[in-house]
């Protein structure tokens, strides 16, 4: 699209320079090539899948959803503390510095969110094997049980959403989603930030 030139006199703008009539409008954009025309049917399928993925992402990030799941699981912590517990469990153990780096938080925020986990004995501290001045955090049995209870609430939510599906349909959906999950993990990123199939000159997608 042409930018309006404030120095043009009335009737001497860009359209007039190109000899266009006032009602013709601008010429088609001949600049950026946005790639081939997408297949409309395929595009609709991708849009429906994208809506599903967006809904899952919104639910995962929603403080209200996390608080609801914690309430259903009978968990005595907040969603922010649950996020820390999940990260610690995912890595087996972690330091507070690790958590601050992974979650892009400052140390004071991490310390505040860790406090209820320790007060309720959901995580325990031990000295690091290479530097005894560093404390490592790991889930306790209570912490693992709480995570299992929250996971059960999530599985129940999915079961409710799939009410009316046959066993065969549920199995097929699970297989297809697992293939999609593996495809997302295998995807690479090119220098422009767009994902590409694995094996191209690029770097791995990080989640």
Image (cartoon, rainbow, N blue to C red):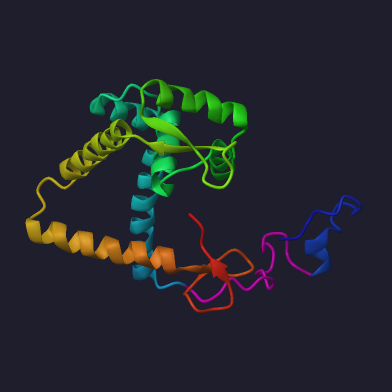
Q: Nearer the viewer, residue 52 or 27?
A: 52
| Vertical order, 132 against 204 (above or below) | above
The residue located at (54%, 27%) in the rendering is 111
Res 22 quadrant in image: bottom right
Q: Nearer the viewer, residue 65 or 11?
A: 65
| Vertical order, 78 against 173 (above or below) | above
The answer to whether one can see residue 154 in this image is yes
Membership of 34 in magenta stretch:
yes
User: Which segment did they paint magenta?
Assistant: 19-37
Which quadrant is home to the N terminus?
Answer: bottom right
Q: Position of residue 110 (x, y in %)?
A: 54, 30
Q: Main secondary structure of the magenta part?
A: loop
Q: Position of residue 105 (x, y in %)?
A: 59, 35
Count of labels shown? 0
Q: Nearer the viewer, residue 94 or 87?
A: 94
Q: In the rendered view, does 176 fall on the left or right side of 43? A: left
Q: Position of residue 184 (x, y in %)?
A: 41, 63
Q: Nearer the viewer, residue 203 or 22?
A: 203
Membership of 148 in magenta stretch:
no
The answer to whether one can see residue 62 in this image is no
The residue located at (40%, 47%) in the rendering is 90
The residue located at (30%, 37%) in the rendering is 144
The residue located at (33%, 21%) in the rendering is 76
| Vertical order, 106 against 188 (above or below) | above
Q: Position of residue 116 (x, y in %)?
A: 43, 22
Res 104 quadrant in image: top right
């Amino acid at each position: 699209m042409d930018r309006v030139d404030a120095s043009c006199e009335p009737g001497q703008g860009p359209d007039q320079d190109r000899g266009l009539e006032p009602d013709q409008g601008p010429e088609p954009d001949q600049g950026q090539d946005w790639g081939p025309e997408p297949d409309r049917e395929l595009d609709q399928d991708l849009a429906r899948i994208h809506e599903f993925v967006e809904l899952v992402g919104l639910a995962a990030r929603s403080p209200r959803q996390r608080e609801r799941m914690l309430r259903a699981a009978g968990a005595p912590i907040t969603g922010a503390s649950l996020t820390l517990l999940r990260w610690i469990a995912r890595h087996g153990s972690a330091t507070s510095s690790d958590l601050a780096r992974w979650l892009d938080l400052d140390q004071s925020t991490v310390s505040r969110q860790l406090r209820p986990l320790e007060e309720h004995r959901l995580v325990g501290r031990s000295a690091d094997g290479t530097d005894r001045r560093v404390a490592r955090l790991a889930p306790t049995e209570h912490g693992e049980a709480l995570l299992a209870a929250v996971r059960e609430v999530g599985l129940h939510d999915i079961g409710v959403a799939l009410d009316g599906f046959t066993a065969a349909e549920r199995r097929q959906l699970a297989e297809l989603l697992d293939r999609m999950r593996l495809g997302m993990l295998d995807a690479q990123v090119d220098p422009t930030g767009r994902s590409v199939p694995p094996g191209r000159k690029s770097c791995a997608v990080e989640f």
